[in-house]
Image (spheres, rainbow, N blue to C red):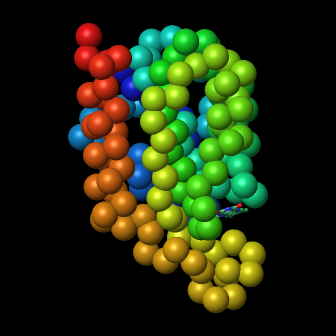
Amino acid sequence: MKTAIVYASVHHGNTKKIIDEIAKTKDVELIDATQTVEKDLSEYDLIGFASGVYGGKFHQSVLKFASVNLTDNKNVFLICTYGGRPVFKSIEQVIAYKHDNIVGRFSCKGFDTFGPFKLIGGVSKGHPDEKDLAAAVEFYNGLTEQPVFLK
Ligand SMILES: Cc1cc2nc3c(=O)[nH]c(=O)nc-3n(C[C@H](O)[C@H](O)[C@H](O)COP(=O)(O)O)c2cc1C
């Protein structure tokens, strides 16, 4: 099975830590959406979109990448890291428009020093931590064990 994770991780590399952990033991291709505009995704059986939450949305580059490159009937999963709370709506809207199938969502806290939080030394300090990383790997393993992938 071929998996790609399209990501943006521009604040503290929190999201990158999560997907690096997943990619460490699995055959997963990582695509940095801030560097890649166009890519043929037809060869992948499973596509992840991973991002920090910025102003309540996935990073614009991930949303744009999905709009440009995602074709219909793909199995996709979503990962976000956040300072306050997880929000998937922006990417879910793109995926709904493209008629793809969301097979799972994972989120965890990520160190956040944006705006006023900087003054207090940031929030969600120390995240993602070891537990978050282990939970992300467990999430990914669970996904690939779903009936749709066990052909
Ligand atoms: C410009 C900016 C806006 C942010 N807006 C939100 C937000 O709306 N909600 C939230 O929960 N966290 C917000 N955060 C915190 C990030 O989502 C969090 O730190 C995330 O883990 C960053 O991921 P990254 O290090 O992979 O970029 C924001 C951070 C930045 C820099």
Answer with the quarter of the image where residue 140 lies.
top left
Instruction: Report the number of discs.
Output: 0
Q: Quadrant of the C terminus?
A: top left
Does residue 107 appear left or right of residue 151 in this picture?
Answer: right
Quarter of the rendered image showing ligand 1: bottom right
Q: Is residue 57 visible?
A: yes
Q: Is residue 47 above or below residue 53?
A: above
- Give x and y (percent) for residue 9: 57, 52
Name which residue lies at 54% across and 50% down. Answer: 80
- Between 54 and 17, the residue placed more toward the observer is 54
Does residue 15 appear left or right of residue 136 in this picture?
Answer: right
Q: Is residue 36 above or below residue 126?
A: above
- Give x and y (percent) for residue 50: 53, 43
Q: Quadrant of the N terminus?
A: top left
Q: Is residue 31 visible?
A: no
Name which residue lies at 50% across and 45% down. Answer: 79
